[in-house]
Amino acid sequence: MTNEDVVAALIAALERKDLATAVGFMTDDVEYDNVPMRKVFGHAGVVESLEPFFAGCDGIRWEVLHQAASGDVVMNERIDRFQIAGTWREVAVAGLFVFRDGKVALWRDYFDMAAAGAAMS
């Protein structure tokens, strides 16, 4: 798999809320930095960060609008959609994925916290 294939598979797992599969695409010491929120480390940190939010979602769909890859780096621009209480909410996101030995070692997402808060309320 190319690094771009890994990012696509990671996103597909997240859309299924399959966090066990998702973290399998990451190094054991992965750094997950949700920039306007907080940074966590390791598989347990990723699961503890995402699981409570994902539990409140009836559906998740992430649309990659643009993506570029160079060496061990994949960057994308996305619209992350979350279905909550029957309504789809959208957040514009820029993602950075840095690879080590074929797995994501750093996942950093950038988004506007005020816009995300408004979309989720």
Image (cartoon, rainbow, N blue to C red):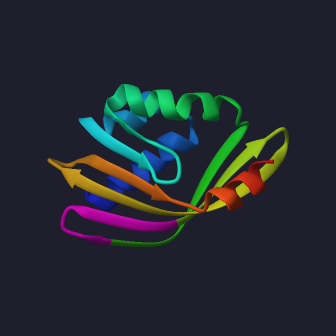
Q: Is residue 36 above or below residue 94?
A: above
Magenta span: chief secondary structure = strand
- Determine the image quadrant of residue 51: top right
Asked whether, in this view, residue 18 is left or right of residue 41, the answer is right
Q: Nearer the viewer, residue 113 or 29?
A: 113
* In-front residue for pair 71/43: 43
Relative placement, left or right, of 121 versus 69 is right
Q: Is residue 75 magenta?
A: yes
Coordinates of residue 101 in the picture (x, y in percent):
14, 47
Examine the structure image and report whether residue 80 is included in the region drawn in magenta: no
- Residue at horizontal 85 percent and vertical 42 percent from the top: 86
Relative image position of residue 77 (x, y in whole percent): 50, 69
Percent position of residue 48, x then y:
48, 27
Over which residues does the magenta segment extend?
69-77
Residue at 53 percent across and 35 percent down: it is 50
Residue 39 visible within the image = yes
